[in-house]
Amino acid sequence: MLDIVQQYINTLVHFNWQNLFTQDFSLVIFLTWMIVPFYFFVTLVAGLIKQSLRHIGDRDDLLIVQIPTIGNTTVNHIVWRLRQYDIKNVLYWLIIEEWDDENKYKGFDKVIKVPSSFTTRCKYKARALEYARRVRLEMINRGELPREYKVLQCDDDSVPSKELMIEAKNTPYDVLIATIKPNYSKGSILARIADYERPFACSCTCSFFTSIKKPVWAHGEALVFNHKVDRLISLDIPCVMASEDMIFTHLASYHNIKMTNTPNTVSIIPPLRFSDLVRQRKRWIWGHINAIRFVLPLGSKIRLIYANMIGLVGYGLATVFIPLVTFNIVQLTPEQHLLTTISLGIWFLTRFIAVSKVSGVKHGLIATALSYIIVTINFIVHVRGLLSKPPQRFEVIEKTI
């Protein structure tokens, strides 16, 4: 160990920049191992700065907490917990399908049942959200709903924090995206490990790109939008059958609106079984492919392709290169060795900061120690989903709270 440290010190003292940009394959390995860690580090720092500069506001608008579900009574517990916050001027709406029984749901101010006669070009959850949107617009026309309001879009297994709900009411932004905070006490072991990637993605990619109005990922666990966006964006679009919240956010970004990301969190439960994790990620990846092929404008297509590729291709190449260097099949120069070692340290530091700021130091340390396992699990389930047939229906997973 001391010999390695001494070698690095000698390399640093006699550093030769020309040895970085060699004319063989070592340059490809060097650039791969450098670019990905520094990309995430830069987006993390930039995202933290943008979050700290966001305006909190003091509007105190009416907030409609909207939860769509397919028969999951977990929503009863969610609405009970949210009412314990005792936040004034909040309405709790539930969206259910035509076959569901509204009598089994308790604590909601309004239960919207999507009628079988309602037809749209979109499907599944997007269809239900579009129907609720039209209900709001009709209520405004009848004078039953004020013209200015906010919607906090949740899922039937997500619990927004009190701080997030208060910011949602007060924010001057038209779109506000929360930070995912998994509950690591529940879910399958592999799913818990895999979901350490979610606060990492929120803290890096989401926090930066959303804050400059160039969203990449966007999730339905806690998406806030106001009356202006509600009127502008319809999901009645052909081919929308998954990733509807991401599509909604991307389409909104092309209008004259303000958008940002908040460090305030929404709690989620990792998938309860590994098979649910696979099913969930398969729905995501094919939702992205479908959105890229048929729905999103060119700028969004480019960002989404880039974000997916830097994970899949970047990880794949970086992993393949490890044995090439370890067994001296390809030799790096001392200067390349030094800087790639520093980039590895930057990678671990980025993982620690990104996760610990959301879930605490304990989970930050776990996410750092398991970082390679985390990205490997996510790589495997995404590739498996990519290589399988597209879902022929909306893939639902078991929920709990």
Image: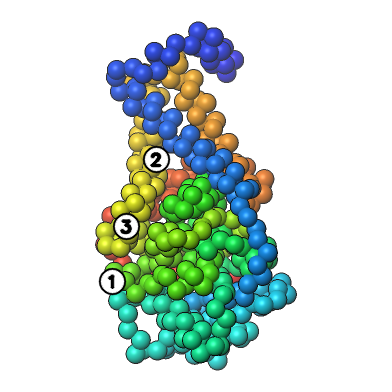
Q: Are marks 2 and 1 in contact (CB under 8 Å)?
A: no
| Residue 274 can be seen in this image | no
- Circle 2 — which element? helix
Instruction: Name the residue beneath numbered marker 2.
Output: 315
Residue 131: which numbered mark, if any? Answer: none
The picture quadrant where one finds residue 242 is bottom left
Label 1 sits on residue: 238
Closer to the eye: label 2 or 3: 3
- Residue 377: x %, y % from top left: 44, 49
Q: Which of 291 and 384 is in front in this view?
A: 291
Mark 1: few/some/many CA within 10 Å (<14, 14-19, 20+) = few
- List the residue tagged with mark 3: 297
The vertical placement of 380 against 83, above or below, is above
**Is residue 252 visible from the viewing direction of this image?**
yes
- Is 291 displayed left or right of 216 in the figure? left
Q: Between residues 239 and 49, which one lies in front from this camera angle? A: 49
- Residue 310 image offset from top left, x and y in percent: 38, 42
In front: label 3 or label 1 = 3
* Count of numbered circles in the view: 3
Identified at 64% across, 77% down, the residue is: 90
Which quarter of the image is occupied by the N terminus? Answer: top right
Secondary structure at badge 1 equals loop
Amino acid type indicated by mark 3: Pro
N-term-proximal mark, 3 vs 1: 1
Q: State how far apart marks 3 and 1 are (Cα).
A: 14 Å
Residue at disc 3, secondary structure: loop
Residue that appears at 50% across and 8% down: 14
Q: What residue type is labelled 1?
A: Pro
In the picture shown, does residue 38 fall above or below 97? above
Query: Residue 137: where, in percent of width, then height?
Result: 47, 82
The image shows residue 14, relative to residue 169, as above or below, that is above
